[in-house]
Image: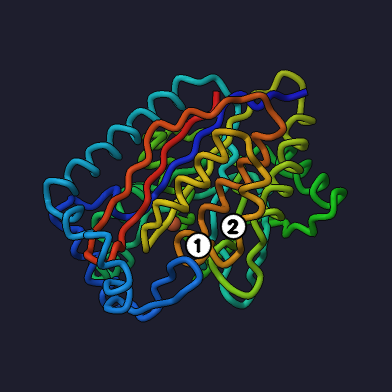
Amino acid sequence: MAEIVYAFGASHGPLLSTPPHEWDLRANVDRKNPELAYRDGTFDFAQLAALRKADGFEKQNTLDVRTERYDRCQKQLDELGRRTLSQDFDVLVIVGDDQHEWFMPDTQPTFAIFHGKEVFNRALTQKEEADTIARGGGYAMKVYFPPKDEIYPTPVDLAESMIHRAMDEGFDVTACASQPQEGGQPRKLGHAYGFIYRRILNSKPIPLVPILINTFYPPNQPTPRRCFEFGRSLGRAIKAWGPGKRVAVAASGGVSHFVVDEDFDYRILKAMQANDWDTICKEPQIMFRSGTSETKNWIVMAGIIAETKLKMELLDYVPCYRSEAGTGSGMAFATWE
Ligand SMILES: [Fe+2]
């Protein structure tokens, strides 16, 4: 039997790498977004600002408050790195969402598991770098992509046993045997995985099994309950892996964004702390839209955790507001030991 020894969850949004005085770069994108998802509604910026006027977000959006929130997040990202790198484990299973990074709209798997020999986190080409900077992603690019190519080995036997188990247990999972290619080179590693390596693991080439969830794009996003049950299946497969093996798990992304919903975030995080899986599974599907959908990565991980005796420690929850409409990111950082 293998043992799941440690887990962590981390938000990974661009505000984590953008200096607070530059958060308006992102707020200006929100101002032009006609489809801001908030609870069961969809709003343009002016409608959302009017709806949430009583919340007084302008008070949370001063440079002082932004700086205090940014610093809190950096402290927890550093702490996650310290804790994770001090653990003894053989492989890190990362649950992330694929945002048309490996898979494109032509074929968009609900659940996919990579079972090739290695994951290639390639550096951006000069053109990709210039394009990213032109789109306002210059700060974030440094925490998603390495300056030089990096390779993380994948334990194929573990990945394949996860696939077999999933199939046995009613999940018709997509098996990804090699990194999708484009123009003769591998597509870029998704931001959900790159962030963990670049910002938290300090580029240490720890063996990796990527689990790719389509949280974002209609029409085939999994429900919260399905995510949880899929996680349980993964957890059982991990435990049945080779004797003496030690496995860590990470959930990347979430919680609410690009409209911050503190009630939603606290509801999910409290339920996770209480191992109250039913509350999480009953959360309506409509609550998981846009960036908030990445919270499902945490729900898959919760399913894995449910197969262990690990205990959650919420390091911090930091609502990072960047506009008077309450746009921004709810940032959560937690470990299970
Ligand atoms: Fe993301």
Q: Is residue 85 left or right of residue 173?
A: left
Q: Kindly identify the amino acid type of the residue bearing the numbered disc 2.
A: Gln
Q: Which residue is mark 2?
A: 179
Q: As displayed, is residue 250 above or below residue 24?
A: above
In depth, the one of 137 and 40 nearer the eye is 40
Q: Are marks 2 and 1 in contact (CB under 8 Å)?
A: yes
**Residue neighbourhood size for the residue with mark 1, other residues' Cα within 10 Å, grouped as few (<14), some (14–19), many (≥20):** some
One can see residue 167 in this view? yes
One can see residue 254 in this view? no
Q: Kindly identify the amino acid type of the residue bearing the numbered disc 1.
A: Arg
Q: Residue at x 43, y 70 (%)?
A: 37
Q: As displayed, is residue 23 above or below residue 38?
A: above
State which quarter of the image contains the N terminus: top right
Q: Which residue is mark 1?
A: 187
Where residue 146 appears, x then y in whole percent?
36, 47
Q: Secondary structure at mark 1?
A: loop
Q: Is residue 326 left or right of residue 99?
A: left
In depth, the one of 57 and 203 nearer the eye is 57
Query: Alpha-carbon distance for marks 2 and 1?
Result: 7 Å
State which quarter of the image contains the C terminus: top right
Q: As displayed, is residue 250 above or below residue 106?
A: above
Q: What residue occupies the far front of the structure in this picture?
A: 54
Specify the quadrant of the image occupied by residue 198: top left
